[in-house]
């Protein structure tokens, strides 16, 4: 299950990076901000799962 969550976090992070880049390219601030938010959410999910792995017996 943790592997699924890590993959989901990576997917969110990559999607956010792409959205942010596209938003910058077309000059759409809203899309850029949404991309940053998705990227942060994906990074947080990955960090949470890494922390769980650290404390597993």
Image (cartoon, rainbow, N blue to C red):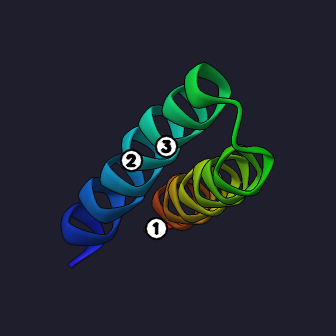
Q: Residues within 10 Å of mark 3 (few under 14, many from 20)?
A: many
Q: Nearer the viewer, residue 45 or 54?
A: 45
Residue 15 has which mark? 2
Q: Nearer the viewer, residue 33 or 26?
A: 26
Please tell me whether residue 5 is drawn above or below residue 32 in the rendered image: below
> Residue 51, percent across and down?
62, 58
Label 1 to label 3: alpha-carbon separation: 34 Å
Describe residue 57's horizontal placement relative to residue 6 as left or right.
right
Q: Which residue is mark 1?
A: 56
Label 1 or label 3, whichever lies nearer to me, is 3
Please tell me whether residue 46 is drawn above or below residue 25 in the rendered image: below
Describe residue 49's horizontal placement relative to residue 8 as left or right.
right
Describe residue 3's horizontal placement relative to residue 5 as left or right.
left
Q: Which residue is mark 3?
A: 19
* N-terminal-most mark, 1 or 3: 3
Q: Residues within 10 Å of mark 1 (few under 14, many from 20)?
A: few
Please tell me whether residue 6 is drawn above or below residue 56 in the rendered image: above
Q: Are marks 2 and 3 in contact (CB under 8 Å)?
A: yes
Position of the C terminus by quadrant? bottom left
Label 2 to label 1: alpha-carbon separation: 29 Å
> Residue 8, percent across and down?
30, 64
Q: Secondary structure at mark 2?
A: helix
Label 2 or label 3, whichever lies nearer to me, is 3
Write the residue at 63% across / 63% down: 41
> Residue 13, percent across and down?
48, 46
* N-terminal-most mark, 2 or 1: 2
């Amino acid at each position: 299950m943790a592997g699924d969550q890590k993959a989901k976090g990576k997917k969110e992070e990559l999607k956010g990076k792409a959205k942010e880049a596209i938003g910058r390219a077309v000059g759409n601030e809203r899309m850029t901000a949404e991309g940053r938010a998705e990227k942060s959410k994906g990074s947080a999910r990955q960090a949470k799962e890494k922390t769980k792995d650290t404390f597993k017996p």
